[in-house]
């Protein structure tokens, strides 16, 4: 019974993070995203993700697990559960600018990180199908109200180290996240979390 309650709370907090990120990206005017549709930005962003992928692979090999990081940290270079901070502490030496897509609006760049981490793999030793398992994806993906950052959509880093630009988002970002988000709304109805995260939050449409 305790394990089941713990799992529900872990799911709730993960989804609350999703809702918080959605509120961030939807607060930025769409026009600020539209100006960024440039192929050069897509290539640079993809190259950055590939280099981050090399560091994640090195971490996974050395620690025998994937980074135990959160979906999207509030302070990427201070939060000990941030993928940025975890890799920094491991000696990866990733320049801070690599965590920012050049196509992102300035107001989003100021947050220090424009990618979300697949926290469902946090702390796991291995994955059954790494070429299909996404690790990092551009933060725009959390809402239908926000356009993709590149001409070919979103850059996605997979667990085998390859990066793909596509308009087709992973199922965990689309159907599963949306279904879970709706379940969270039902589960926390009447709870204090509802007043903190749902009452004044714009409609959150995970892709």
Image: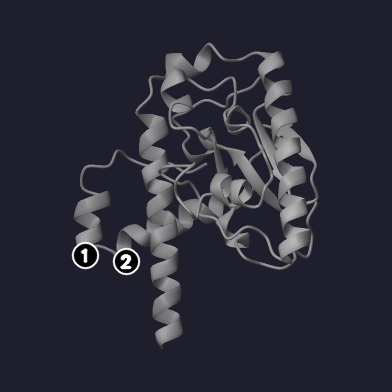
Say if residue 47 shows up in the picture: yes
Q: Position of residue 4 (x, y in %)?
A: 44, 81
Q: Secondary structure at mark 2?
A: helix
Q: Residue at x 71, y 14 (%)?
A: 40
In 3D space, how far apart are the residues under numbered discs 1 and 2 (Cα atoms)? 8 Å
Where residue 33 is drawn, which disc sits there? none
Q: Nearer the viewer, mark 1 or mark 2?
A: 1
Q: Which residue is mark 1?
A: 191
Residues under numbered marks 1 and 2 in contact, where contact means CB atoms less than 8 Å apart:
yes
Q: Which residue is mark 2?
A: 187
Seen in the picture, residue 132 relative to 163 is either above or below; the reply is below
Camera-nearest residue between 131 and 67: 67
Q: Residue at x 47, y 51 (%)?
A: 178
Seen in the picture, residue 177 relative to 165 is either above or below; the reply is below
Q: Position of residue 139 (x, y in %)?
A: 52, 36
In the picture, measured across the screen, residue 160 lies left or right of residue 73, that is right
Image colouring = one colour
Q: Secondary structure at mark 1?
A: loop
In the picture, measured across the screen, residue 59 lies left or right of residue 199, that is right
Quadrant where the N terminus is found in the figure: bottom left
Counting labels gives 2
Camera-nearest residue between 18 and 91: 91
Q: Position of residue 98 (x, y in %)?
A: 63, 30
State the image quarter where residue 74 is shown: top left
Q: Residue at x 78, y 65 (%)?
A: 128
Q: Residue at x 20, y 61 (%)?
A: 192
Camera-nearest residue between 27 and 106: 106
**Mark 2 residue crowding within 10 angstroms, few (<14) / some (14–19) / many (20+):** few
Say if residue 159 shows up in the picture: no
């Amino acid at each position: 019974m305790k394990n089941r309650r713990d799992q529900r709370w872990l799911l709730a907090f993960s989804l609350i993070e999703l809702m918080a990120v959605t509120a961030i990206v939807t607060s930025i005017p769409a026009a600020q995203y539209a100006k960024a549709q440039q192929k050069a930005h897509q290539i640079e962003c993809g190259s950055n993700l590939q280099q981050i992928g090399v560091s994640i692979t090195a971490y996974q090999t050395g620690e025998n697990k994937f980074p135990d990081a959160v979906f999207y940290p509030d302070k990427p270079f201070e939060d000990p559960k941030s993928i940025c901070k975890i890799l920094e502490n491991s000696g990866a030496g990733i320049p801070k600018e690599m965590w920012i897509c050049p196509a992102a609006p300035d107001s989003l760049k100021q947050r220090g990180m424009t990618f979300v981490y697949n926290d469902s793999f946090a702390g796991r030793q291995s994955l059954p199908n790494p070429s299909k398992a996404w690790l990092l994806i551009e933060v725009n993906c959390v809402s239908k109200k926000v356009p993709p950052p590149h001409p070919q959509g979103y850059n996605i880093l997979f667990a085998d180290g390859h990066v793909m630009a596509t308009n087709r988002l992973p199922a965990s970002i689309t159907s599963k996240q949306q279904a879970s988000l709706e379940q969270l709304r039902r589960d926390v109805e009447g709870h204090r979390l509802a007043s903190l995260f749902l009452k004044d939050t714009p409609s959150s449409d995970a892709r």
